[in-house]
Image (cartoon, grey):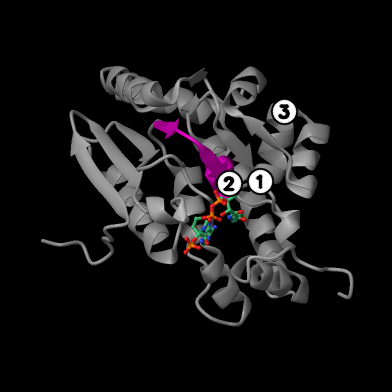
Amino acid sequence: MTDPMQTELVKISEANGVMEIIWNRPDKKNALSNAMYRAATVALARAVEDKSIRVVLLASEGDSFTSGNDLADFAAASMGGEAPAAHGFIEAIIQFPKPIVAAVPGLAVGVGTTMLLHCDLVFVANDAKLTTPFVNLALVPEAASSMLMPARIGHARSFAMFALGDGFTGEQAAQLGLANAALPKDQVIPAAREAAKKLALRPIGAVMAAKKLMRDGEKILAQSRTESAIFGERLRSAEAMEAFTAFREKRAPDFSKL
Ligand code: COA
């Protein structure tokens, strides 16, 4: 039976205990639309329930991991349209009890980077680019990244990422502890698949218990919800509207009169 939430823009498959969720919108650098978030959220819910699934692998088609939330969807939400479906996906990934492995071959913008903070093993290309330019879009950090990123890499580096849009290469990300390994691009997916395969053979009860012990799930969820409320307000601001319009018109935003 076809899942009504399925979209060809996310490829979902299962084999040998591993569910692969693959962003498949390479012509838009895998920008995540509401339909894509919903498809991934439904898949994660199924992976929680299905005992045969022991690990999730997050990966992508093309050279980018993802360019973040679809800015046309943000623009629509900012004008009172459909609320972004990112929220549901973020809560699903925060609460996901089984291990998640990520393969990042290139660009990881916004939620593309913040979702990595909820993955348990992360493999990146040497020349990948991780950025979280929330303030450039008149937004604020999400997915509990305002708490998790400073905990990982310190306040000053995190602030430069969020407020200035500064980014890291894959190599830097691995040095800073945001990733397990930085590799040549063509080795990223094979390394992630190999790690997922190994994890699927481990005793799942112990793996899940270890993951739970390592994360303060309640605190992470609470922070994400606090961020979400502010994010929603920011999304409806005149500043955000200018940022989204500027992206659509392929020009730099002008916040000087706002
Ligand atoms: N939402 C919607 N469309 C996006 C997108 C996004 N987040 N990111 C890229 N695209 C689209 C572009 O509009 C373009 O579409 P077109 O070919 O129909 O014009 C296509 O993907 C390719 O992107 P382009 O900008 O031409 O590639 P680039 O290599 O010059 O730049 C980025 C890549 C990711 C740096 C740039 O697209 C960008 O800044 N995107 C927005 C990222 C962002 O702010 N995300 C939200 C973070 S919260």
Amino acid type assigned to the residue bearing label 1 in the image: Thr
Disc 3 to disc 1: CB gap under 8 Å: no
Q: Residue at x 32, y 43 (%)?
A: 21
Quadrant in the picture for residue 197: top left
Disc 2 to disc 3: CB gap under 8 Å: no
Does dot 3 land on a helix, a strand or a loop? helix
Does dot 1 land on a helix, a strand or a loop? loop
Determine crowd level at label 2: few under 14, some 14-19, many 20+ residues with C-alpha closer than 10 A: many
Q: Residue at x 52, y 19 (%)?
A: 180
Q: Position of residue 49 (x, y in %)?
A: 27, 45
**Which residue is outermost to the right?**
257
Q: CA distance from mark 2 to mark 3?
A: 17 Å
From this view, report whether residue 249 is shown above or below residue 119.
Answer: below
Determine crowd level at label 3: few under 14, some 14-19, many 20+ residues with C-alpha closer than 10 A: some
For residue 132, the mark is 1
Question: Nearer the N terminus, badge 2 or badge 3?
Answer: 2
Amino acid type assigned to the residue bearing label 2 in the image: Val
- Residue 13 located left or right of residue 243: left
For residue 40, the mark is none
- Residue 188 located left or right of residue 5: right
Question: Nearer the N terminus, badge 1 or badge 2?
Answer: 2
Q: Is mark 1 within 8 Å of ligand 1?
A: yes
For residue 153, the mark is 3
Q: Is residue 139 visible?
A: no
Q: Which residue is mark 2?
A: 109
Q: Residue at x 61, y 81 (%)?
A: 79
Magenta highlight range: 100-115
Amino acid type assigned to the residue bearing label 3 in the image: Ile
Q: Is mark 3 within 8 Å of ligand 1?
A: no
Q: CA distance from mark 3 to mark 1?
A: 14 Å
Q: Is mark 2 within 8 Å of ligand 1?
A: yes
